[in-house]
Image (tube, helix red, strand yellow):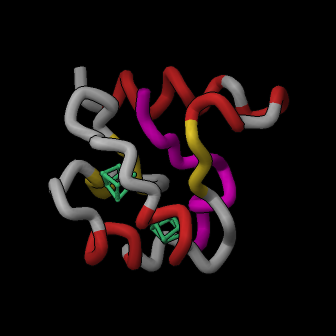
Amino acid sequence: MTFVILSACINEKDGGCVAVCPVDCIHEGPLMYYINPAECISCGLCETICPVDAIRHVDDVPGEEAEYIAINEDFFK
Ligand code: SF4
Ligand code: SF4
């Protein structure tokens, strides 16, 4: 299981989550940042520091943001 970055990161993109991730699995894309689900160890650190509350555990992603689970995964394909 992994954490997922949601739409609130678009336009914010401050990169704070990258600095705290212990396994460097958060990467910058053209629109937003993405979490590599194959590398995330689900420590939850990034969720606690995001200024716009854009990060959620995959089990807690709201229905209207569900597409971002695949969007994060697809960025690393
Ligand atoms: S801390 Fe939040 S807003 Fe900043 S890059 Fe990470 S997910 Fe995006
Ligand atoms: S939950 Fe932990 S390992 Fe996963 S992306 Fe966030 S900081 Fe990195």
Residue 54 point in image, percent of width and height: 63, 59
Q: Please name whichever residue, 47 or 54, is drawn nearer the observer in this view of the structure.
A: 47
Taking the image as shown, residue 5 lies to the left or right of residue 29, namely: right
Q: Is residue 65 above or below residue 52?
A: above
Taking the image as shown, residue 58 lies to the left or right of residue 13, namely: right
Whether 25 is among the magenta residues is no
Residue 8 point in image, percent of width and height: 68, 59
Taking the image as shown, residue 66 lies to the left or right of residue 26, namely: right
Q: Residue at x 29, y 53 (%)?
A: 26
Q: Residue at x 31, y 57 (%)?
A: 28
Residue 30 point in image, percent of width and height: 38, 53
Give the residue at the far left of this rendering: 23
Q: Residue at x 67, y 66 (%)?
A: 53
Residue 6 point in image, percent of width and height: 62, 47
Q: Is residue 54 above or below residue 12?
A: above
Q: Please name whichever residue, 37 or 75, is drawn nearer the observer in this view of the structure.
A: 37
Q: Which residues are magenta?
A: 1-12
Q: Quadrant of the C terminus?
A: top left
Q: Quadrant of the N terminus?
A: top left
